Amino acid sequence: MADSKPLPALNGNPAAAEALLQEVFGIVVDEAIRKGTCASEKVCEWKEPEELKQLLDLELRSQGESQEQILERCRAVIRYSVKTGHPRFFNQLFSGLDAHALAGRIITETLNTSQYTYEIAPVFVLMEEEVLKKLRALVGWSSGDGVFCPGGSISNMYAINLARYQHFPDCKQRGLRALPPLALFTSKEEKRHRTNCGLPILTSRHVTTPSRRELLFWDLALTVSEWSRLMREGEWSLRIWSSTSLWLRLRALCHSWSVPLLAPLCW
């Protein structure tokens, strides 16, 4: 049953809204920041799913709860969550807590705007352009455009779509079936996998330097050359990738040119 005290309406009551936020911010600072970044505290108060369901009481009710209960739920959410700012939290994507970044997130969440146009987000649009300008400069581009992506997977998908459109700008009018078979070449550092767009992938040797990761030119050139020859001979089929035929062809080709051996992806 919901608490008998209803959640007070904060609209039109700035003092009540400010008081609530002050208390929530206090909980965040104490539980998520102070304790969440302390090495003597746990990274997570781990509970098994069924037990955690009972502790949190996640049932959606038709009536609201008291402000005291809301604040207690805020504490519980933080208590049983993973503290990514903890010094003993390790993850392949993120870790640590930066006070300046958190302050920025508080501002953006409070303003709750979107970067659709300058009219709706004048400051953030200018900030976005400046960040993109800096990122372009890092890769040696003096002009261009850009887009912020939520992760690596969709970034790779955007890159593949742009590359396809660059080589086949009429793909939108003719459709994918009208295009020739396409291949994607990647370095050995990338995980061997299939792409969702159905492009076969070859893994090639790579050179790691202090400043960048790049493919060996001759390795890539030989792979593309062999791929093109197979296309001309009409030997395109998944059979090529599931057998050792291409591997043997590439090995003989690389041996005759006295260059390192390529390792094609086995499907």
Image (spheres, grey):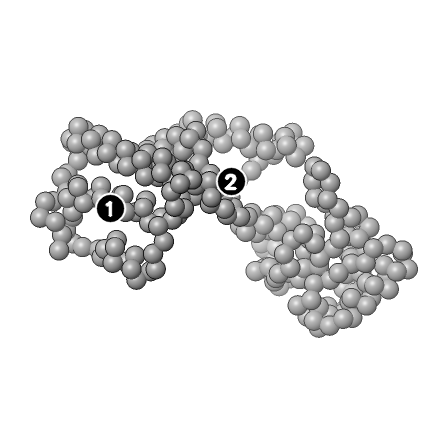
Q: How far across and how far down the image is residue 7, in percent?
A: 14, 42
Quarter of the image with the N terminus in it = bottom left
Q: Is residue 24 left or right of residue 107?
A: left
Q: Secondary structure at mark 2?
A: loop
Q: How far across and how far down the image is residue 22, in percent?
A: 24, 31
Q: Residue at x 73, y 62 (%)?
A: 264
Name which of mark 2 and mark 1 comes first in the sequence: 1
Q: How far across and how far down the image is residue 185, in percent?
A: 70, 54
Within 10 Å of disc 1 (Cα), the crowding (few <14, some 14-19, many 20+) is some
In the image, 243 versus 47, the foreground residue is 47
248 is higher (above) or lower (below) than 129: below
Quarter of the image where one finds residue 114: top left
251 is higher (above) or lower (below) than 221: below
Quarter of the image with the C terminus in it = bottom right
Q: Amino acid at mark 2?
A: Phe
Quarter of the image where one finds residue 29: top left
Task: Give the residue at mark 2.
Answer: 148
Q: How far across and how far down the image is residue 4, in percent?
A: 8, 48
Task: Give the residue at mark 1.
Answer: 73
Q: Tell me the distance, in whole angstroms, between the alpha carbons under discs 2 and 1.
A: 33 Å
* Circle nearer the viewer, 2 or 1: 1
Q: Is residue 76 left or right of residue 39?
A: left
Q: Residue at x 91, y 60 (%)?
A: 256
Q: Amino acid at mark 1?
A: Arg
**Whether residue 117 is visible:** no
In the image, 84 versus 266, the foreground residue is 84
Q: Residue furthest front?
A: 40
